[in-house]
């Protein structure tokens, strides 16, 4: 499933060769037009190939709003959608190889997947003897081996476009993508993290975490209990009363704050498929069903402490303390009060707007992302800009995901008390 296969597929290959041979990469306007005209073809090819290239494209798109020209980012944004599923005969052969005939015969597996993504797909199964309902997460063949080569070629594609400013080093993004991809295809690691995260939320009936089933699991097939839920954009969720939506939003936000301040572990993949909602027939205890712990990231102390300090300082609108935190995180080179430093600090203050609101913040009406982008855009390619540390890039993904969930639920909630509780009372550091 390497991008190398795409290179020999007709439509994309021929177009790339024509433009590269004519030196069109030097003509940015025509290259932009080319990228946009070919976006559907390129992303369609990547969707069929699946694997690390598609996932890396998704990761790049999540950072692209801040780092890449919009023409490039529009191409990668198209990769955010679910990919086509692998055909059942291929999946069945993987299951037979990994589980063996006896174990596979003990299961009744639905050939139709309940979900398909860039690195694998999930099938529902029933254990014949016990009736236990399971979820089988099957890794696509070859994705693990293709990570390094796919990332190299993706980077060459971006470089060939000639739209990335010379002073912008994307090494940190691609190293982060490599690390994340390697973790997300390590199913043995994810099996352990399922248990670990489940223990963290033990007794909290607002959340459901699948339980791993070790006797059926390998590094190519992760088996866990099947936990039913509805997608966030399901019509049944959209038709809920605003009171129930607000309660779901508060619980989701509360979990995020616990991850960042108490657990020191954050599920960093904001894809909607990683979160479902299980409705309570009585309407009092709707639950979040949580999936995909391959993207769970530990916050290391050398990053975690200054990050929490930055959150507290920005929340309190303390310019001096915020600048100190930004220097410690490597986002500012010094304590010099440059225009860029002042603007970055002001931007930090701006994005705390929803959580400093004394009343209920209306997430359905907010234009905060647009205002923040307008403030940040003039500095995106400034020579003084320093890329954030990798862990902050991961957290940026999650923050964006939390924001999207709030908007999707049209939340009107008061989060100030939650933020103060965790930032100033229960933070582990």
Image (cartoon, rainbow, N blue to C red):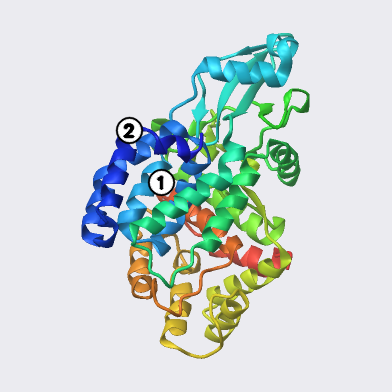
Q: Which residue is under mark 2?
A: 10
Does 315 sit left or right of 361 as displayed?
A: right
In this orientation, which residue lies closer to the viewer: 19 or 162?
19
Q: Position of residue 42 (x, y in %)?
A: 35, 40
Left or right placement of residue 223 versus residue 122 in this view = right
Q: Position of residue 211 (x, y in %)?
A: 71, 32
Judge whether residue 101 can be spotted in this image.
yes
Element type where label 1 sits in the image: helix
Residue at numbered disc 1: 408
- What x and y, as percent, mark residue 276? 53, 36
Q: Residue furthest front?
A: 21
Question: Contact, CB < 8 Å: mark 2 with mark 1?
Answer: no
How many neighbours does mark 2 have within 10 angstroms: few (below 14), some (14-19), or many (20 or more)? few
Front label number (2 vs 1) = 2
Graded by Cα atoms within 10 Å as few (under 14), some (14 to 19) or many (20 or more), the crowding at tag 1 reads: some
Residue at the image position 61 percent from the left and 67 percent from the top: 420
Residue ID at (70%, 67%): 425
Horizontally, residue 351 falls left or right of residue 184, namely: left
Horizontal and vertical percent position of residue 340: 43, 82
């Amino acid at each position: 499933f390497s991008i190398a296969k795409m290179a020999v597929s007709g439509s994309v290959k021929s177009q790339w060769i024509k433009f590269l041979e004519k030196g069109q990469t030097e003509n940015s306007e025509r290259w932009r037009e080319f990228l946009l005209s070919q976006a559907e073809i390129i992303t369609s090819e990547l969707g069929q190939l699946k694997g690390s290239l598609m996932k890396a494209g998704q990761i790049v798109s999540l950072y692209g709003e801040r780092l890449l020209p919009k023409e490039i980012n529009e191409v990668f944004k198209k990769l955010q959608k679910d990919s086509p599923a692998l055909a059942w005969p291929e999946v069945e052969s993987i299951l037979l190889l990994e589980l063996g005939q006896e174990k596979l015969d003990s299961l009744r597996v639905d050939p139709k997947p309940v979900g398909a993504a860039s690195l694998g797909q999930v099938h529902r199964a029933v254990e014949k003897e016990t009736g236990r309902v399971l979820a089988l997460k099957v890794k696509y063949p070859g994705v693990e081996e293709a990570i390094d080569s796919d990332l190299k070629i993706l980077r060459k594609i971006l470089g060939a476009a000639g739209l990335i400013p010379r002073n912008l080093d994307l090494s940190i993004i691609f190293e982060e993508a490599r690390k994340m991809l390697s973790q997300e295809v390590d199913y043995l690691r994810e099996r352990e993290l399922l248990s670990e995260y489940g223990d963290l939320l033990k007794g909290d009936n607002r959340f459901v975490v699948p339980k791993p089933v070790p006797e059926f699991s390998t590094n190519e097939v992760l088996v866990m209990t099947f936990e039913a839920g509805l997608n966030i954009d399901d019509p049944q969720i959209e038709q809920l009363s605003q009171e129930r939506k607000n309660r779901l939003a508060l619980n989701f936000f509360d979990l995020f704050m616990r991850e960042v301040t108490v657990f020191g572990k954050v599920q960093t993949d904001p894809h909607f498929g990683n979160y479902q909602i299980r409705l309570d027939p009585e309407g009092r205890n709707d639950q979040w069903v949580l999936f995909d712990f391959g993207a769970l990231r530990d916050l290391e102390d050398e990053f975690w402490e200054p990050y929490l300090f930055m959150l507290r300082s920005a929340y309190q609108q303390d310019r001096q303390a915020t600048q100190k935190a930004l220097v410690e995180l490597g986002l500012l080179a010094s304590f010099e009060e440059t225009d860029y430093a002042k603007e970055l600090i002001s931007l930090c203050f701006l994005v705390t707007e929803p959580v400093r609101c004394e009343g209920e913040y209306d997430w359905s009406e907010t234009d905060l992302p647009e205002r923040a982008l307008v403030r940040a855009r003039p500095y995106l390619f400034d020579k003084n800009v320093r890329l954030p540390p990798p862990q902050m890039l991961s957290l940026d993904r999650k923050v964006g995901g939390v924001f999207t969930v709030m908007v999707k639920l049209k939340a009107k909630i008061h989060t100030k008390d939650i933020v103060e509780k965790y930032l100033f009372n229960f933070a582990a550091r």
